[in-house]
Image (cartoon, helix red, strand yellow):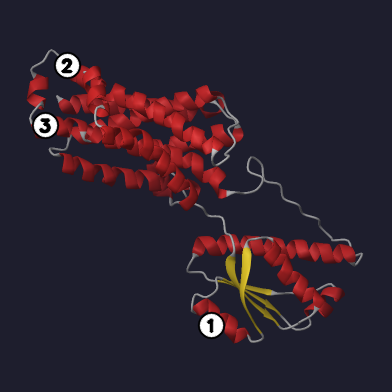
Amino acid sequence: MVRKERRQLLRDPRTRLVVFVAPVIQLLLFGYAVNTDIRDTATWVVDLDRTAESRRLVAAFETTGRFAVVGRSDRPGDLAAALDQGRAIVGLEIPSGFARNLAAGGASVQVLVDGTRSNTATVALGYAARVIESYGRARMELAGVPPGVDLRARAWFNPGLESRMYNVPAVIGVVLLLMCLLLTALAVAREREIGTLEQLMVTPLTPTELMLGKTLPVAAIGLIDLVLVTAVAVFWFEVPFRGNPLDLLGAALLYILAGLAAGLLISTVSRTQQEAFMTMFLFILPAVILAGFLFPVETMPAFFRWLSLADPVRHFLVIVRAVFLKGHGVVELWPEYLTLAGMATGALAFAVERFR
């Protein structure tokens, strides 16, 4: 059965492309597209002070590379119009008397952002606050006025706060799940649809042997895909890998088995390949959303936080991010390893029982 499944998966050149090339392409696409960093954000400036100090502040925004000034005006109404019409995402208004107030020790500026793009607005406000704070500290030091509190934040594990360090390892989990479900959700449904399931049922194969025969070749392919996408993450996206490869390999094996068992379960309840394909997407979309792929699980309502505990993607993302960025292993992450093992065993046993 294993030999038959391996031959069926690899004999078609197009299938080989889907199995081995598509995961790499997906990682590249997701790695660049799923990015919450901001670069050259369209910024409109209203400088009512027109002094050297106000020009230095605008220059401080531009030199970060996060903001690009796309327009200037002397009227605050133009800034509001630029935000309303979508010509700018961030607006900076420097009031008259800014330099004088700064010399006196109490200056203020106004930053407006387009809140319809909530993620971009939140990140842009954070960067703007840091730019203004750094500028104010530098001007106070030049004036010989020591700051009351010198607060300097340090980010561990991702000093540059680059989103790809957080997102790319998570994309590995999504790509693996998608491949496992795609290859197994259609397995039994295909046999039933083309009429070969009856032939398998009259062979000496037991349901457990049939399920293992359909699972083991795909698990081997999943591990090969893991090596490919991990290499792309480390050498192309330059995501640091601080953990033990064996810890990642063990977690991936449990995760792949859990994904394969879920795919087989979908396959056993679907009568056609089209039905299995649709059911697969009904499973994968909530699984990715509840896993904390883009948004932290901690920000979800309590019901969905509890529901996400039954999601294997959530537990694997905790492992893969910790192995990559923190160097953690089985000792620190044993609850997630144990949960994945239980999910894989339970789903596979239920799939076998369902097949009977």
Crowd rating for badge 3 (residues with CA inside 10 Å; few <14, some 14–19, many 20+): many
Q: Are marks 2 and 1 in contact (CB under 8 Å)?
A: no
Q: CA distance from mark 2 to mark 1?
A: 71 Å
Identify the residue position indicated by label 3 in the image.
192
Give the x, y percent position of residue 342.
Answer: 37, 26
Q: Circle 1 sits in a helix, a strand or a loop, which is it? A: helix
Above-or-below relation of 183 to 208: below
Foreground residue among 203 and 333? 203
Q: Are marks 3 and 2 in contact (CB under 8 Å)?
A: no
Which residue is outermost to the front?
13
Identify the residue position indicated by label 1 in the image.
81
Foreground residue among 9 and 242? 9
Q: Are marks 1 and 3 in contact (CB under 8 Å)?
A: no
Residue at 17% across, 16% down: 206
Q: Amino acid at mark 1?
A: Ala
The label number, if any, that marks residue 206 in the structure image: 2
Q: Circle 2 sits in a helix, a strand or a loop, which is it? A: loop
Q: Earlier in the sequence, mark 2 or mark 1?
A: 1
Q: CA distance from mark 3 to mark 2?
A: 17 Å
Whether residue 62 is visible, yes or no, is yes
Crowd rating for badge 1 (residues with CA inside 10 Å; few <14, some 14–19, many 20+): few
Q: Earlier in the sequence, mark 3 or mark 2?
A: 3
